[in-house]
Amino acid sequence: MTQAPDIWADTLVAMVLVALDPSLGGVALRARAGPVREALVAEAKAIARRPVRRVPPGVEDARLLGGLDLTATLSAGRPVMSVGLLGEVGGGTLVLPMAERMGGALAARISLAMDQGIGFAVLALDEGAEPEEAMPAGLRDRLAFWSSLEGVRRPGVLVGFDMARAAERLAAFRIGDGDAALFVEAAAALGIPSLRAPLLALRAARAKAALDGDAVLTEAAVRWAARMVLGPRALRMPEVDEEIPDAPPPPEAPPETPEEEGAADKPLGDIPKEVLLEAVAANLPADVLARLAAGGALRPLAARGAGAGGEIKGSKRGRPAGSVRGDVRGAARLDLIGTLRAAAPWQPIRRRMQPDAPARVLVRADDVRVRRYSEALERIVIFVVDASGSSALGRLAEAKGAIELMLGEAYVRREDVALIAFRGESAEILLPPTRSLVQTKRRLAGLPGGGGTPLAAGLEAALALADQCKRRGQMPALVFLTDGKANIARDGAPGRAQASEDALAVARAVRTALLPSIVIDTSQRPQTQAADLAAALGGTYLPLPRADARGISRSVDAALVG
């Protein structure tokens, strides 16, 4: 029986390896705020022995990257540049609290700095309460270690390491030709699509061997790296043979010792790939099996801006909306008149405090004002239609008529409309975002009905399309026309219980993305399934058992516009 890993000890060792080899990127730690996590962060600061800087999820570019310090420039009469957090951290550690709330732009800037080889490590603290709440995938992929403190109650004790000697051994380490291929094959067997994963696993094994006092890669280091780096990234269960073939008998001549010439080039070809897969499979937690069977957790887009059809306020474009206190080291535009107006009342006091100041306006950081702009968001209504057998026999014809009416009204308001239908075992985007009345009517006329109800697939397709629309600067609103009676799970297997559970899980991901949604219960006798779906979505529930196409259209228009 395989012994359960010590999560606390493994995470501490991972942070030691990151401090030893910054090319490992860092650690993504899934943990809620509490004494256990704070103890681990304190250990990370002690291990780093270099500058540690916290980067909040809403940090501005000027604070992160540095730039012109306006206040110091006005006071000195010459350009004064400031150093951002990335410059202050040097070769230290960036701590990212609330990493699950980090925006894509901030994650991209940190990822770019890591790719440029600045040499800092990252400790990302993911505090997500639900599986679908996660940090940006691009940044997480650059971090070698993914760990979780769930279930850890009492911190352990970190065993001391000789970092200086380990660094010397790591500098002298050389990788054999077949070593990388072993990790690549293991990653492929686990269904890991990222090319960084086997490279990070190889680096982790090398650093772990150096930390253990070895000059070559050992089976223990390889197993540990596979479990810590490849295990959390696995997308399918590996096929591990029951019996691992015995190693060939050793030769009569004594093997070379690590001190002998050429020992560092010893490849890992004598370690079967099954050894790595066995190490990963034996330590996967039980919930991973269910998560892999369900297809993994969704990564919703962090919501930005106002509600559907509203306005978004920023500092780049749009119509003027006044000025606010801010910082112009980023993309914001200076409101010179507002800045001078804010500084003017304080000039007598500042002159008395600085009698030797030059004859210019004394400006402080609190006086700086930046322009604000308001930009109207273009709304898109995404209709998600249940075309399964239960709806086809009931209200599918009325749903088609309602969509045609609402499309005409959306065309008058210059809004786009998209159409997704789900039936059988999958969902399909029948109509990409468009304003074409003719094209939409043609697609609706050819919409077939019948088959199972893959509600989770329809929700996933709607979430993915809404994500694309947000990236284009649109504000999507979702309209679901269904009876809510799912009977096809996310993996295509029939079964009402699992299908309903999968649908509610994806609905919570839609709610996390703060997408306005409406659920129109198209069943002739409304029950609880559609109402539960609306509650999971955080949207509006409209039971319309006796409404025709025009009644459905009026109700949706009132809920979206009103």
Image (cartoon, rainbow, N blue to C red):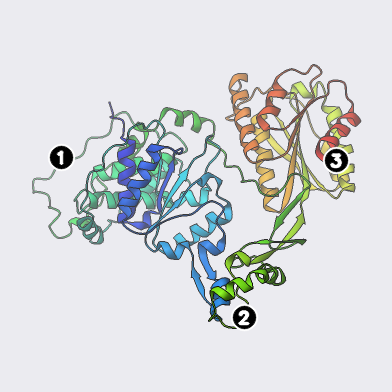
Residue type marked 3: Arg
Return the x and y of residue 73 as percentages of the image width and height. Answer: 56, 76
Circle 3 Cα neighbour tier, 10 Å, few/some/many (<14 / 14–19 / ≥20):
few
Circle 1 Cα neighbour tier, 10 Å, few/some/many (<14 / 14–19 / ≥20):
few
Q: Would residue 225 appear left or right of 515 to someone viewing this image?
A: left
Q: Are discs 3 and 1 less than 8 Å apart at CB?
A: no
Q: Which label sits in the foreground, 3 or 2? A: 2
The residue beneath circle 2 is 360
At x 39%, y 42%, the residue is 38
Return the x and y of residue 443 as percentages of the image width and height. Answer: 82, 39
Residue type marked 2: Arg
Q: Is residue 344 above or below residue 485?
A: below
The image's mark for residue 442 is 3
- Say whether disc 3 or disc 2 marks the residue closer to the N-terminus: 2
Separation of marks 3 and 2 at Cα, in angstroms: 70 Å
Separation of marks 3 and 1 at Cα, in angstroms: 72 Å
Question: Which image quadrant: the N terminus?
Answer: top left
At x 30%, y 42%, the residue is 224
The image's mark for residue 558 is none
Regarding residue 182, the answer to whether it shows in the image is no
Q: Would residue 12 appear left or right of 247 to someone viewing this image?
A: right
Which is nearer the eye, 308 or 266? 308
Instruction: Report which quarter residue 187 is drawn in.
Output: top left
Residue type marked 1: Pro
Separation of marks 1 and 2 at Cα, in angstroms: 86 Å
The residue beneath circle 1 is 249
- Say whether disc 1 or disc 2 marks the residue closer to the N-terminus: 1
Return the x and y of residue 487 as percentages of the image width and height. Answer: 65, 22
Q: Secondary structure at mark 1?
A: loop
- Say whether disc 3 or disc 1 marks the residue closer to the N-terminus: 1
Q: Is residue 146 above or below residue 77?
A: above
